[in-house]
Amino acid sequence: MELRARALQCLTETDPAAKVAAVYAMADASALGACAPDPQAELAADAAIPGRPAQPELVSPRLLGRRGMNTAEGRAMLIHALAHIEFNAINLALDAVWRFPGMPLAYYTDWLQVAKEEAYHFSLLAEHLQTLGYRYGDFNGHDSLWEMVEKTSDDVLARMALVPRTMEARGLDANPPLRAKLAQAGDMAAAGILDIILRDEIGHVEIGNRWYGFLCRQRGLELRAAYADLAARYHAPTLRGPFNLEARRQAGFTEEELEALQRG
């Protein structure tokens, strides 16, 4: 099956373990040259997007419970929240592969690589959650990340600007303090997983930055002005510090962008 059609099939899969296995299989097939993308294929979903299990129940972020680090349940709630983010991140990468026609071949293989790494992150967190006596779905989750994916379904430029460069880049900022909390609580296994996630997420944000720059050049747009327009048009969240400036530099943000970010 052609890569983009297969990504859509993976996206509609509801079982997390089956979705992860399907992503790995698709990545392996792509590496062997058995699953090439067709940028011009016209695709349509025949099932709900994204495919997700009945649990966790999705609620407003303000209705989620407190995640105190002084109890195993509190740590499990945090690990569950991170696993939920990574599950959504698998879906957003798959959606980036299938939804947008007419991009260079490298765009599709870049986002396939992101999907594979997000699947790995989810698996690490889900397995660690089980060592704490819980499973993915045992706590509620929220849908803020996917809401921005849906908002930007009409334009690949908006998607690159507001999902990897905005929503996922917030994860670069949030990772170090979360890691410190888990390490202070003695959960060094979870802290190690966050190290892996930060390393890979820098690459994911860089992919978003790179394709955003490509699209701006293709459309004759100035990067920062176009971003400001898109953020306003799609009601992107206001970014607040502290910012992980070094990680953002590695992910391709310019010094001018970082200075503007710190000025607010």
Image: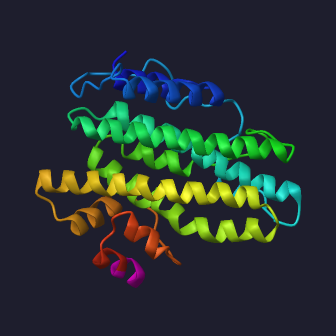
Q: Is residue 61 above or below residue 68?
A: above
Q: Looking at the picture, tell me which residue is in the foreground, 163 or 21.
A: 21
Considering only vertical position in the picture, is 9 above or below 259? Answer: above
Residue found at the far top of this picture: 1
The answer to whether residue 133 is above or below residue 37 is: below
- What colouring method underlies this structural image? rainbow
Image position of 212 (left or right of 64): left
| Res 242 seen here | yes
Percent coordinates x, y for residue 197 in the rendering = 57, 54
Q: Nearer the viewer, residue 139 or 196?
A: 196
Q: Is residue 251 left or right of residue 24?
A: left
> Is residue 127 shown left or right of residue 60?
right
Q: Position of residue 45 (x, y in %)?
A: 41, 22
Picture residue at 65% right of the left edge, 39% below the top: 123
Find residue 178 and report its horizontal and vertical position in percent.
67, 66
Q: Is residue 231 magenta?
A: no
Q: Quadrant of residue 166?
A: bottom left
Camera-side residue of 234 and 210: 210
In which quadrant of the rendered image does the C terminus lie? bottom left
| Residue occupying the point 38% across, 71% down | 249
Q: What is the magenta range?
A: 259-264
Farthest residue toward the bottom?
A: 263
**Rendered location of residue 259, percent (x, y):** 35, 82
Quarter holding residue 177? bottom right
In this view, the residue farthest toward the front is 32
Q: Is residue 234 visible?
A: no
Q: How many marks?
A: 0
In the depicted structure, whether residue 76 falls above or below residue 95: below
Query: Residue at 36% of width from left, 34% of height from top?
Result: 97
**Screen quadrant of the N terminus:** top left
Q: Main secondary structure of the magenta part?
A: helix
